[in-house]
Amino acid sequence: MSTIAARVVETAAGRFEVTETGAGRPIVLLHGALVGAELWDPLVALLASRGYRCIAPTLPLGAHHEAMRPGTDLTPPGVARIIADLLPVLAPTPATVVSNDTATALVQLVLADHPGVIGRAVLTSGDAFDYFFPPMFRPLQWAGHAPRLLRLVGRAARVRLLRNSPAGFGLLTSRGITDAQARRWTDALINDAAVRADAAAFLRSVDKRYTLEVVDRLSSVDVPVLVAWSEKSRAFPMSYGERLAASIPGARLETIPDSSCYSCIDNPERLAQLIDAFLQEPSR
C-alpha cells in the first residue's frame, strides 16, 4: 500500500484538503456534517490493501480548515454542485463515490442533477426522504442561525464523554470518535469565524424538501448503485435504506451488521467486502 501525502485542490468554490491512499482504481469517499476525511481511515486502509486508490476530500460542512470563497452557495443543491465540480478534478474518469451520513443526501442530488460525474455509487446510512436531518439532530440547525453556538459545539466535541454520548456522536458510532479526530474536526470551527459561517450557512439550509423532491428524479439514474445500510443505525432506520434502494433503478440493498451509521468505523471489514464485490461486477 502506498500513501500519497495530503494535497490541496482548488475549484471555483475554494480550496479543499484531499488525502489519497493506495494505488489503482479510484474511489472517492464523502463524509457528512461536522466531520472530516479522517472518518474514512479504517475503511481506507482495507480498500487500499485490496488495490484501490482512495481519495478523501474534506467538504465545507464544518470540519474544513479554510473557508470557501465569499458568495459560495452552501445550500444542499449548492454543495451538490461543489461535489460535481470537484469529482472530475479528483479522478479523470467518473469514479466510484462512497457516501455516508449527510453526504448520502448530497450524492442523491449529484446522481439526479449532475449525470456523468459519478461512475458508480455506494450509499451508506445517511439522510434520505423526510430524514434530512433526522429528528434527533435537527437542533443542530439552531446553530445555523447563531454561528457562535458552533464554537460551543466544537468545544463540547473535545470532551470524550460528551462527544461519544447520545448528545454527540453516540447515535452515529458504537466505537466512538477519537481525541485526535475531535481535535482535527473542531480546530477551525472553534477558531475561525469564516469556517463557522460556512457551517452555519449549510446547517440552516438543510431541509427535507430537498431529499423528498429528489426521489422522482432518482428514477432517471442509470449508473450502478449499491445501498449499504447499517442494521443498528439508530439515526437512520433500515426502512430508509430499503426505500432508497427501491427508488433507484437497479440498485441493490446490502446490510452491515454490528454497525451504527458510521459503518466505516464500526464495521469497515464488511463495508470493504461489499465495495470490493460491487466493483468487480460488470458495468451496465
Image (cartoon, helix red, strand yellow):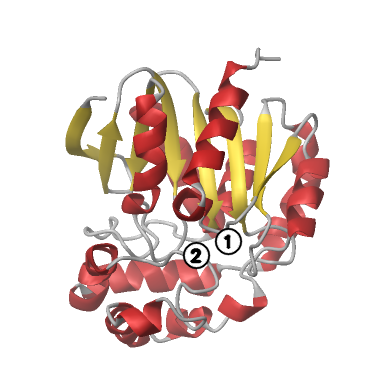
Q: Are marks 1 and 2 in contact (CB under 8 Å)?
A: yes
Mark before the other along the chain sequence, 1 or 2: 2
Q: Amino acid at mark 2?
A: Thr
Residue 139, by quadrant, is bottom right
Residue 128, by quadrant, is bottom right
- Percent across and percent down for residue 250 are 79, 29
Q: Residue at 76% x, 48% y: name it.
A: 244
- Residue 15 numbered tag: none
Image check: 56 left or right of 141?
Answer: left
- Residue 173 numbered tag: 2
- Percent across and percent down for residue 78 are 49, 53
Report the front residue among 180 and 5.
180
Tag 1 residue? 260
Vertical order, 111 against 42 (above or below):
above
Dot 2 falls on a residue whose secondary structure is: loop
Residue 114 visible to the viewer: no
